Image (spheres, coloured by chain):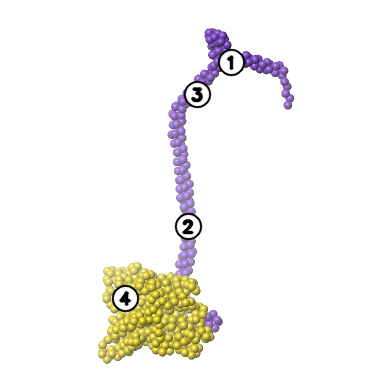
Chain colours: A yellow, B purple
Amino acid sequence: VILDSLGIALVGIGLVTPTLDYLLKKRISRYASIVATFLALVLSLSLFASAFGGKSWFLYNEAVKVDAVGAFLSVVTSLSVLLVSIASFKRTQKWATAPSYFSLLLLIATGAFYIVSVNDTILLLAGWALVSLGAYAFIGVKKDEQSLQGATKYALMGIVASTFMLFGIAILIGLTGTTDIAIIQQLITASNPQMVTLAVIMFITAFGFKLGIVPFHGWLPDVYGNVDPLLVSFIASVTKILGMAAIFRILVPLSPALGQNWFVLFAFLSIITMTFGNIAALTQRNIQKMMAYSAIAHVGYMLVGFAAVTTSNGATIGMQGIILHLTAYALATVGIFVALSYLIEKGVGTNLNSIRELWRRMPILSVSMIILDLSLLGTPPFLGFWSKFIYLFTSPLEIAPWLTLIAIINTGISVGYYGQILRYMFLARKSGDGEVVITETVNPQLITVVVCATLTVVLGLVIGPFFSHIIPSV
Amino acid sequence: LDVELDLLLTLISATIVALGSILAYVIYRKPYLSESLARRIEVSRGLHGIYNFLYDRWYLNAIYYAVFVHGGKKLSNGLFSNWETKVMDRFYNSLIVKAFTGAVNGVSRYLEKAVIDRFYNIVVVKTFTGVVYGASKFLEKAVIDRGYNIVVAKIVLAVSHLFRKSQTGKINQYLLVLLSGFLFLLLLLLLGVI
């Protein structure tokens, strides 16, 4: 009932609002979006409450598996969509495509809700199509040159990547004769391991494109770095959640068939992804582009958790780390990209030089941004510290401590660019500056950034240390 | 070894010994002088004098005491009171002490200035700081500056620029990289690496 209500609330409102906007000649879609996403958050929380304590059950002819992991990721998705809806409230007011914007927001969220709980490859395909097509349109919704260019790249690469997913699904059906992941998991161990590995490579190519795993990442820096940051705030957070959930739902059940090859594959991808992201971000002078490469680096960190899946202990800690890090990352990404959108709106810009001594002009925004920046860096007591250092990096200790070391070295490299934001915002002097005037005004975008920062601090203190009790077994 | 015995000398010696023995026997055989002899000695002044002189063994003890013991005592007292206190004490307590402390001060000052100050504080410290400075400068220049800051930083920056340059903005190149990545993983699978 909850999941049905969730689907109806989001898809129904999402599909109806643009027409209502057109017929009524009133901009009601933004209100409808906030109401729908708030409703989604409440429904997700109730879903999590019913799945709490290790309970799980199947729905829709075993196409959907409801458990604590899926429900928790639904909560994070709802929260991200709600925060983006609030941030977009005023900013999109003058956009001609605003009704479509909110409609796409809700449709993509619906796809994401099904993917985080998927147990059938056909539903995966349907959800993937909904999210992908929605995301390509969403990136181009502003209709400026950057948006359209980004949307084209995203769509063209997305089509190629989705083809690989189709091949992967075909191989799995060919090997087992079913689309049900729970049954595939039982039958796959008797199959040819090389064919299973081939299917996994196909899926990794598709999911890796969506997540930004190197070398399937090409579109990501261009889209995240150039398109309006408000659009990126949504795509960056929600696609990470659903991409990671897809690996968890579809690929992790296949891991026993791969044996040690699973670790080799994911450790290799994790190392090249985080190293590429961190080193490329080092020389960026534009915060938005810096955050684009940082997004790649964070995918690399999360792959460390997947690499650890080969042992039961590593699997539990790794998955807890991925889920918690998705929460920390979603909050930080929404917060920082919305903050960048606010800076553009205020005419400040997103270059490092333009944020010199920003704390004098925008103290609340600066402090909030730094909290989110430090959370991404992994500084205690913020949420990112727990997810990164307590769960993700400790998960492969049993089988490969060197992978932990590489991840820590990468975090060290990331200080080079996260520190730049802190330095320019608080320490660097602004030349020729006369009287300092506070230019901050109460704005839905500023409220969103503050909420993200507050949640990063509060959740860091409340759920960070106890997360292994919140989702005890994966 | 030839030993000759002089008969005359031997005879004289023996006679003297014999006479002495007899005389001693005569005198000491009787413990005291006979009363008559004692009275005569007492009455006769000359004999009394000789007797006393002999009895007091030529006054040798008296002379010895008077001259050597008391004289020595007086001399030592005199020497102590005058020489020791007035000369030696002053000399020892003041002059020698002063000379010694002066010498010690001088030597220590010399040691401090010439050896400690110049050698330890200047030469050793300068050498040590020089060595440390040189080593740290070498380390800083060769290892940290050239090695870490320049070589590592240059490599990282060059790699960073290279990575950024890989973002050409051209979709066909991105697709080529994506397919290359897939083919690379496929190659690993075919080679049996994974």
Q: Are marks 1 and 2 on the same chain?
A: yes
Q: Which mark is residue B31?
A: 1
Residue at x 48%, y 26% (from the top left corner): B76
**Cβ–Cβ below 8 Å for labels 4 and 2?**
no
User: Which of these two is toward me, A286 or A137?
Assistant: A137
Badge 1 or badge 3: first in the primary sequence: 1
Nearer the observer: mark 1 or 2; the answer is 1
Of B188 and A115, nearer the camera is A115
**Amino acid at circle 3:** Gly
Whole-percent x and y of residue B98? 44, 36
Q: Is residue A40 left or right of residue A403?
A: left
Residue identifier under label 4: A451
For the residues labelled 4 and 2, the Cα–Cα distance comes to: 53 Å
B64 relative to A70, above or below: above
For residue A50, above or below residue A404: below
In the image, A220 versus A369, the foreground residue is A369
Q: Where is residue B162 in the image (x, y as percent from the top left)?
A: 46, 76
Q: Which residue is disc 2 drawn over?
A: B132
Crowding at mark 3 (Cα within 10 Å: few <14, some 14-19, many 20+): some
Viewer-side label of 1, 4: 1
Task: Please name the residue shown 45% across and 36% down the image.
Answer: B97
Secondary structure of the residue carrying numbered label 1 = loop
Q: Is mark 2 on a helix, strand or loop?
A: helix
Mark 4 is surrounded, within 10 Å at the Cα level, by few (under 14), some (14 to 19) or many (20 or more) other residues, namely: some
Residue at 46%, 84% (x, y): give it: A203
As measured in the structure, the alpha-carbon distance from the residue carrying label 3 to the one carrying label 2 is 73 Å
Which of disc 2 and disc 3 is earlier in sequence?
3
According to the picture, the residue beneath numbered tag 3 turns out to be B72
